[in-house]
Image: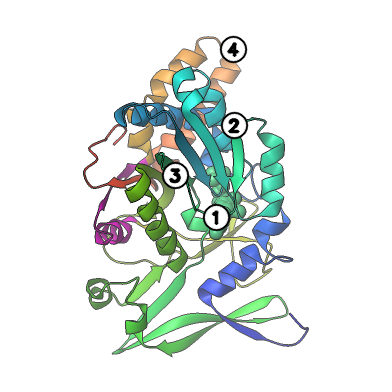
Amino acid sequence: MKKNKSKILSLDNFIDYALYDKKKGYYIKKNPFGKNGDFITAPNISILFSEMISIWLVSYWNHLNQPKKIDIIELGAGNGALMKGIINSLKNFPNFYNSCNFLIYEKSKTLIDIQKKNISSQKISWKKKLEFKKKNPIIFIANEFFDALPIKHLTKIKTNWYEKYVEILQNKGKFRQKKIDVKKYKKDLFSEIIKKQKFIEYSPLSLKYLRDIGKIINTNDGGLLLFDYGYSENKFKDTLQAIQNHKYANILDNIGNRDITYNLNFYFLKKFIQSLKKLKSIYINQRSFLLNMGIMQRAEIISKKLQFSKKADLFYRVGRLIDEDKMGSLFKVMFVTKKNNSFKVGF
Ligand SMILES: C[S@@+](CC[C@H](N)C(=O)[O-])C[C@H]1O[C@@H](n2cnc3c(N)ncnc32)[C@H](O)[C@@H]1O
């Protein structure tokens, strides 16, 4: 962008610029994960998170009658901790492990390099497009992927709808509004949603991914296991936020140096998946999912061999994943699959 020249972008284009611009984008420039980064994600808190997903994968593969070939693809793999943990855990289940082909779909070249350094396996490759020639089942895993996708804000004032824009001048932004014809957004927002809401926060790109993944699940079989923070109310909330150094920050300052994120509306996502006809979804909070998958039993087994300080650390980390006031209830786990699929393990 030229100096002193302002630029006006719709909120989703602004977020895309701030997070993924080839030169200035947050996820393109740096590794934001861990203590020295801006935030920490579940697979970086405890290996037990990846282990519980691995057990879920084995159970689902059994439910699908143990297909000889199956793809496990992670969407947006960050520093690769989850995929690394899954590959290592699944080595304990050789029949399943031998059937697996592991894939990562990642946008940031910087993070792809980090993932390649972190995961050493002959069985993994990186995919640029979500296109699959082979017809074996595919399981998509997404931890905090959807919350990293750009969103739009639409607001109704009296009888008119407005979309939020951001004017950028010298690395600082200002919110603007533009009047819109809300009917043009109908592909994503069915009329029932538009009629009931005065404010809508949604990600067109997320819905595009869900449509594409839905088609793949319908042809190949498999599913999507999604972990993200969000809420279940049928009213949209304004949850747009920026995070820097593990603290909330202003999204309009210091553009390209802060993560921008939001909370998913699971009520709306469930409705959207229902509208895709042949698909269904179920969801539960992260606490219940991890407890149902046996995280406490696993922690007990591991802790037997540990010294007291390590034992305390292990349970402290499990607590961060499942406690109601930490990630336990804010985070939800959603499973999307074919309508006739009855698999419910973990839910
Ligand atoms: C919040 S991070 C979550 C990382 C990881 N799943 C974890 O749990 O640590 C979001 C990830 O999604 C990636 N990402 C965002 N948008 C993407 C897109 N459109 N296509 C592929 N990857 C994307 C980011 O680069 C980053 O790796």
What is the number of the mark on residue 140? 3
Q: Amino acid at mark 3?
A: Phe
* Position of residue 64 in the picture relative to residue 91 (left or right): left
Q: Nearer the viewer, residue 251 or 58?
A: 58
Q: Which residues are magenta?
A: 266-285
In percent of width and height, residue 155 lies at: 38, 80
Q: Say which element carries label 1.
A: loop
Q: Say which element carries label 4.
A: loop
Between discs 1 and 2, the one toward the N terminus: 2
Q: Are marks 3 and 1 in contact (CB under 8 Å)?
A: no
* Position of residue 269 in the picture relative to residue 84 (left or right): left
What is the number of the mark on residue 307? 4
What is the number of the mark on residue 123? 2
Inspect this view and state whether residue 149 appears: yes
Q: Say which element carries label 3.
A: strand
Q: Are marks 1 and 2 in contact (CB under 8 Å)?
A: no
Determine if the magenta segment contains residue 270: yes
Q: Amino acid at mark 1?
A: Lys
Real-space Cα distance between discs 1 and 2?
A: 18 Å
Between discs 4 and 1, the one toward the N terminus: 1
> Which is more foreground, mark 2 or mark 3?
2
Q: Are marks 4 and 3 in contact (CB under 8 Å)?
A: no
| Disc 3: CA contacts within 10 A as few (<14), some (14-19) or many (>=20) | many
**In the image, is residue 66 above or below residue 70?**
above
Between discs 2 and 4, the one toward the N terminus: 2
